[in-house]
Image (cartoon, helix red, strand yellow):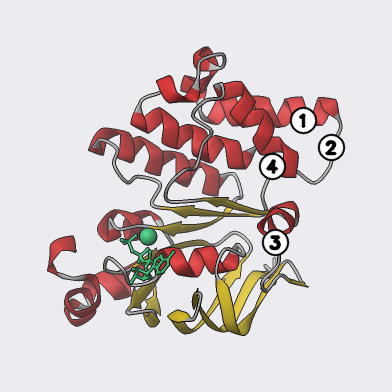
Amino acid sequence: MVSVTRPILRVENLVAGYGKLTIVQNISLTVNEGDFIAIVGPNGSGKSTLVKSIFGLTTIFEGTIIFDGANITSQKPENIARAGLGYVPQVSNIFADMTVMENLELGAISSRGGNGREKRQVLERVLRLFPDLSPKSRAKASSLSGGQRQMLAVARVLMAEPKLLILDEASAGVAPIVAELLFQKLVEMHELGLTLILVEQNARKALSIAERGVVLVQGKKAFEGSPEEISHDKEIAKLFLGEATNI
Ligand SMILES: Nc1ncnc2c1ncn2[C@@H]1O[C@H](COP(=O)(O)OP(=O)(O)OP(=O)(O)O)[C@@H](O)[C@H]1O
Ligand SMILES: [Mg+2]
């Protein structure tokens, strides 16, 4: 059987930042359906700015972003979400004053249609993936543990059935054992067919589960390749990932 790879996201020569400040410098990136990509790099290298730019949250100076065949460059985030792009930001990714179920219901708002029955099926699927959320459905999100909050943040975005899910530092600030569980969930989601972009400071872990890695340094794409190419090349690991990652 011939497998056809279809690009779901194409970032072309993107220059973006905040106000007049340029952070992302001429980055191009193609993500095919079914891909699992890790974006890694030192603190402040522009990882969050790159994914925020894709989601319409920065100033775009040059370049084009094509998602699922449509030009989404500088579109409003709500329109980008409705087009099927799911984004879990690095901070403020849940509504703490609302219940777990309210958060999930809000997540379904940007879904692309579906009747009541289909929406219930999506909820069931999401809760099967994150069973710990079920008994907490009436609890305020603020009462959840750090790990449960991150699970809710991912679950909330999954409620819209995204064609591509972008996670910015899903494991930041949670205990290592919880981070491990989260990474397992991502692998499970990918196996279920979801296309994923994972932004991670924990480069070693991210590259152990992703299929391809993109290394950013000072706003530029410094390297792209298989996790093996990145981690086996001592020069790249040392130059681009920093000593601290111990890759
Ligand atoms: N809202 C903002 N306004 C102005 N500059 C910003 C803003 N957010 C980030 N920056 C700057 O952009 C640069 C890249 O930051 P960014 O958050 O994209 O990096 P990062 O790779 O995600 O870092 P981290 O690993 O710490 O999350 C940094 O110099 C940062 O200070
Ligand atoms: Mg960041």
The kind of secondary structure element at disc 1 is helix
Earlier-in-chain disc, 1 versus 2: 2
Taking depth in this image into account, of 59 and 4 the one nearest to the observer is 59
Element class at badge 3:
loop
Q: Name the amino acid type tagged 2.
A: Gly
Which residue occupies the foreground of this view, 49 or 32? 49
> Tag 2 or tag 3, which sits nearer the N-term?
3
Comparing 222 with 80, the one in front is 80
Where is residue 140 drawn, in percent x and y?
50, 19
Contact flag, marks 4 and 1 (Cβ < 8 Å) = no
Residue receiving disc 1 = 119
Residue that badge 4 annotates: 160
Q: Residue at x 71, y 67 (%)?
A: 75
Secondary structure of the residue carrying numbered label 2: loop
Q: Please say whether residue 227 is visible from this viewpoint.
A: yes
Which class describes the residues within 10 Å of circle 4: few (<14), some (14-19), or many (20+)? many
Instruction: Give the amino acid type for the residue marked by disc 3 in the picture.
Output: Lys
> Closer to the N terminus: mark 4 or mark 1?
1
Q: Answer above or below: position of 127 versus 160.
A: above
**Which three-letter amino acid code belongs to the residue tagged 1?**
Lys
> Which amino acid does the dot numbered 4 rest on?
Ala
The residue positioned 38% from the left and 54% from the top of the image is: 209
Distance between the Cα atoms at labels 2 and 4?
A: 10 Å
* Residue at (29, 42) in percent of width and height: 173
**What residue is shown with label 2?**
114
The residue carrying mark 3 is: 76
x, y percent for residue 47:
40, 67
In the rendered structure, find residue 185 and report the number of the disc placed on it: none
